[in-house]
Each structure stands twice: as C-alpha cells, then as structure tokens.
Image (cartoon, grey):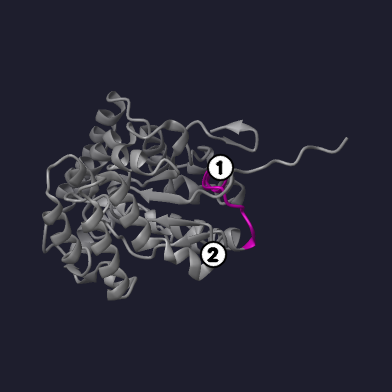
C-alpha cells in the first residue's frame, strides 16, 4: 500500500502578516508570494489596522467623515520618515475614488459589509494581475487589530512575525534617523515593548487555529528549507522551487542584520541595553505572552558561545518533520 499523500489547506484568500515595525514582516510576505497562488500587496495599506482605521471606525472612536478624510489623505499619499507612502503607489486614482465612493454610500446601511467591500475593492484586483487566488497584506498593525480583522474577515489567516527586540528597536531608530521618537536605542526598547504588548493583546483575540507565530531569527538560524513547511502549510501554499530559492538566497542571519543593535556603541552601553531587554522578556514571560518563548530562544542563542547547540525554535508548538518545536 502506498503512503498517503500529505494534503495542505487551500490557499487562504487573505493572509495578514504583521508584527512590530522592522520585525521581518515584509520578507515573510515576499516569501509566501513566491508561490503563484498568492499576490503580494507591496505597500502597507494601513487603513484597516492603523489607529483611526477599521477598529476605531467600528467602535465609534472616529466618524465615517474622519475615516474618509484620513483615507483620502495620509493613507492615500502621506509623507513618513523620508518618503511618500500609501495607496497611490499601488493603484490609480480612478479605482481608488470609485472604491471610496461605494464605501461612503453603503456604510450607514451596513458598516461591517462596507468595510469588507472597501478592503476588497482596493486590493483584490492584485490577484487578477497574477492569476492568483489570495493576497498577502503586510501592514504591521494587523495583529494588534486582530480582534476586528478576524471578525470582519473570517476567511483570513494571520502570521505574526517576531524579531529580537534589540535588533528591531535599533533598526527603528536608524530608520527614523533620530528625527522622531524613538531617538535612542533605550527609547527604542520602550517603543518596542509598547508595540509588542499591543500585539499580544490583539493576538489573544484571534482564534488560535487562524494565527501562526514565527520568529524570523530562528527561521534563518535553521538554515534548512524544511523549516518553511509549517508556515507555507498554514498559508495554504506549497514550498516549491521559487519559495525554497528565496529562503536560501534572501533569508540569512547576515541579511536579517542579526546583532545590529551592538554596532557603534560601547560595551558598557551594550550591557545596559541587554539588561533592559532581558527585563522586558521577563515581563512578557510573567504575563504568559504566547510568543515569549520565541524571543527567549533568540536571546539565549545570541549569548551562547556554542549557539549551534541550541536547536532553532521558529514556531511555538508546531511540528516540523514529525517533532514538536
């Protein structure tokens, strides 16, 4: 008798990839979209997850008029850090205007249906260009907004990407060029903890079978494409040649800038940041944050002389090749 062929779920119509800024969300989204079934939304669209977006709109914190003003303003074309961002980089004005007009006319009759339709009107056309069956959307706050989005989009799955908080916060400080908060690496640590706690609260509102938590640090530490199977199986895509090649060529400790937080600072300052980060980890563990073990493993690996002796922990309680990790 032949061995049964392992089947994977059908591709998810929507995969939300989120995390703190500078955590690896974009690289995970690009990895999944190397599969032909998924179309990448190449910009952070934000209107569904940012403060002032769908969660605040549906709870009455902002009005329809306020939401539309921001949609036509910053979320369409807004200057942030050092360049213009927004939906204008993704689509033409006529498609955008038609979607917003349909939203405005239908919102008062059925608020949730209008929000769903706006999302699909603005983004689903990307699948037609690629002849795909699903989209991967990579706005950072999608996990923090998980309660609202999980209700609005029962067909969606959520991937939360975590990265060593020291590296993520240092990258954020470098990104802002010290022009806005956070301006220092210790400020960056506090920024990161605040963001990660919001994400933890949001992830608790996502049904467990629709949420996958993955460590970018541990994923690249594995150095084996077999480690991609749980992630791809969750999204409903295969680990074909293009996916494996992307992992092999584009995902490494060097490309992930692991340890960048230590660059350009004194040993004394590095020790202070490490103490602060360990205190943050202890607070997350005391709060039973689900993804704390992923962060702890990366932290211990960074301090280990024989780091290779620590088996990678890319996921929490997800089997890889028949073993639990």
Give the x, y percent position of residue 194.
19, 41
Give the x, y percent position of residue 305.
44, 42
Q: Which residue is mark 1?
A: 230
Give the x, y percent position of residue 15.
44, 50
Query: Up-down: is 3 above or below 107?
Result: above
Magenta extent: 231-241
Q: In the rendered image, is residue 223 in sight?
A: yes
Give the x, y percent position of residue 296.
37, 35
Characterize the local packing of mark 2: few (<14), some (14-19) or many (20 or more) Cα atoms within 10 angstroms. few
Task: Choose top left, top right, bottom left or bottom right for residue 199.
Answer: top left
Image quarter hosting the N terminus: top right
230 is within the stretch colored magenta = no
Q: Are marks 2 and 1 in contact (CB under 8 Å)?
A: no
Task: Please name the residue shown 26% across and 45% down the image.
Answer: 110
Residue furthest to the right: 1
Element under label 1? helix
Relative to 142, 76 lies left or right: left
Characterize the local packing of mark 1: few (<14), some (14-19) or many (20 or more) Cα atoms within 10 angstroms. some
- Mark carried by residue 284: none
Relative to 243, 251 lies left or right: left
Q: Which residue is mark 2?
A: 249
Q: CA distance from mark 2 to mark 1?
A: 20 Å
240 is within the stretch colored magenta = yes
Task: Please name the residue shown 51% across and 40% down the image.
Answer: 312
Q: Earlier in the sequence, mark 2 or mark 1?
A: 1
Element under label 2? helix
């Amino acid at each position: 008798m032949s061995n049964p062929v392992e089947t994977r779920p059908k591709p998810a119509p929507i995969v939300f990839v989120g995390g703190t800024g500078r955590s690896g969300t974009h690289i995970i989204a690009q990895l999944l979209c190397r599969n032909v079934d998924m179309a990448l939304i190449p910009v952070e669209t934000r209107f569904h997850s940012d403060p002032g977006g769908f969660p605040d709109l549906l709870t009455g914190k902002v009005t329809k008029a306020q939401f539309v003003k921001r949609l036509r303003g910053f979320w369409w074309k807004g200057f942030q850090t050092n360049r213009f961002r927004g939906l204008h980089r993704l689509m033409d004005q006529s498609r955008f205007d038609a979607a917003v007009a349909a939203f405005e006319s239908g919102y008062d009759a059925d608020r949730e249906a209008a929000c769903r339709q706006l999302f699909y009107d603005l983004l689903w056309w990307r699948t037609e260009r690629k002849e795909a069956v699903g989209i991967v959307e990579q706005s950072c706050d999608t996990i923090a907004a998980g309660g609202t989005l999980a209700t609005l989009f029962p067909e969606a799955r959520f991937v939360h990407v975590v990265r060593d908080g020291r590296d993520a916060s240092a990258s954020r400080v470098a990104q802002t060029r010290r022009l806005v908060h956070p301006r220092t690496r210790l400020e960056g640590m506090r920024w990161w903890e605040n963001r990660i706690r919001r994400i933890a609260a949001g992830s608790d509102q996502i049904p467990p079978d629709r949420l996958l938590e993955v460590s970018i640090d541990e994923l690249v530490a594995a150095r084996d494409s077999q480690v991609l199977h749980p992630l791809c199986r969750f999204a409903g895509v295969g680990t074909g040649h293009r996916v494996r090649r992307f992992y092999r060529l584009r995902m490494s400790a060097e490309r992930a800038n692991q340890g960048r937080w230590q660059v350009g600072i004194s040993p004394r300052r590095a020790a202070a940041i490490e103490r602060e980060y360990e205190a943050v980890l202890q607070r997350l563990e005391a709060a039973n944050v689900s993804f704390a073990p992923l962060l702890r493993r990366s932290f211990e690996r960074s301090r280990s002389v024989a780091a290779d002796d620590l088996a990678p922990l890319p996921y929490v309680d997800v089997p890889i090749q028949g073993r639990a990790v």
